[in-house]
């Protein structure tokens, strides 16, 4: 299985800040790396797929990039509704695997 | 707009079999796979497997011996069965639309999720 190591596990920030979350894959995932946002009591929501493509309706303050097997989610200009938990996921290989999540707190 | 809704028992006895169904509003589009993910505090998000309207399925090897999936196109629903349940299987179970091609090719994420159903394994 491909292991997805996500960091940090938690992050404190303020409205208006720029934050970065990182996910490292244990082997190549050919940029089939997705990011999800999850709020308490709700299902995850797809934000970004294939490293950097925004899912429909996702604001442009979210962006994704890659360097080798390291993937980054950046949120520029945090808004109150962005405080949530974020997960990465690889969909290159079966089984699909997720990172353990980053809780973004105020 | 396609929506998914899980249904099934909230409580399962140890060693028994869990049966969950996901009702899809609209047709089960053959462009996608239809899958299951669970989430627990201990294991985080865990992919269980997926099924296509063709009947082709892929399962997580860690669960494969205990899991079966089925799909009923006429009823617009797909199902999960997991046997020999233990406390470690207690989790929120989600169904989701999986944007993966037929076969074992790479996909582009799970774009629609059900609201999730909590399953507790306890005597």
Image (cartoon, coloured by chain):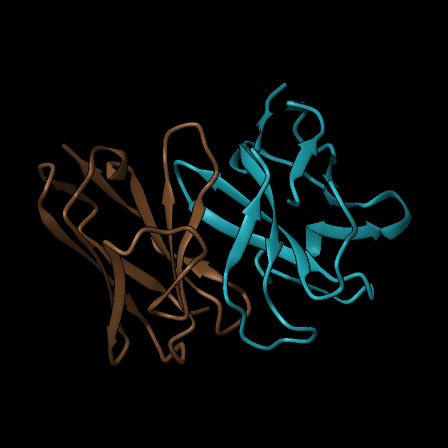
Q: Nearer the viewer, residue A16 or A95?
A: A16
The N terminus of chain B lies in quadrant: top right
The C terminus of chain B lies in quadrant: top right
**Residue B65: percent from left, percent from top:** 69, 56
Whether residue A100 can be seen here: no
Whether residue B13 can be seen here: yes
Identity of the residue furthest to the right in this view: B74
Q: Nearer the viewer, residue B7 or A65?
A: A65
Residue at image point 43% right, 27% down: A41
Q: Is residue B71 left or right of residue B120?
A: right
Q: Nearer the viewer, residue A93 or A34?
A: A34
Q: Nearer the viewer, residue B112 or A28?
A: B112
Residue A52 vertical position relative to residue A103 in the rendered view, above or below: below
Residue B34: image quadrant is bottom right
Chain for colour brown: A
**Residue B2: percent from left, percent from top:** 66, 45
Residue A26 vertical position relative to residue B32 in the rendered view, above or below: below
Residue at image point 46% right, 68% down: A1
**Residue A96: percent from left, percent from top:** 50, 63
Total labels: the figure holds 0
Identity of the residue furthest to the top in this view: B123
Residue at image point 36% right, 45% down: A37
**Residue A69: percent from left, percent from top:** 28, 76
Chain for colour cyan: B
Residue at image point 28% right, 60% down: A5
């Amino acid at each position: 299985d491909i292991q997805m190591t996500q960091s940090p596990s938690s992050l404190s920030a303020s409205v208006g800040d720029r934050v970065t979350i990182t996910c490292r894959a244990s082997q190549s995932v050919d940029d089939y790396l997705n990011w999800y946002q999850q709020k308490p009591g709700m299902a995850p929501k797809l934000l970004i797929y294939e490293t950097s493509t925004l899912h429909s309706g996702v604001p442009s303050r979210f962006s994704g990039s890659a360097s080798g097997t390291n993937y980054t989610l950046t949120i520029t200009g945090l808004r109150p509704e962005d405080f949530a938990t974020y997960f990465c996921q690889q969909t290159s290989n079966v089984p699909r695997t997720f990172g353990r999540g980053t809780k973004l707190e105020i | 707009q396609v929506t998914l809704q899980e249904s099934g028992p909230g409580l399962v006895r140890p060693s028994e079999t869990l049966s969950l169904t996901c009702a899809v509003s609209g047709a089960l589009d053959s462009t996608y796979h239809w899958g299951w993910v669970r989430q627990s505090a201990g294991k985080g998000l865990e992919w269980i497997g997926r099924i296509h309207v063709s009947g082709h399925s892929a399962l997580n090897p860690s669960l494969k011996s205990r899991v079966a999936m089925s799909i009923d196109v006429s009823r617009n629903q797909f199902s999960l069965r997991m046997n020999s349940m233990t406390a470690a299987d207690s989790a929120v179970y989600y169904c989701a639309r999986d944007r993966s091609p037929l076969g074992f090719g790479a996909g582009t994420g799970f774009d629609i999720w059900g609201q999730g159903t909590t399953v507790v394994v306890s005597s």
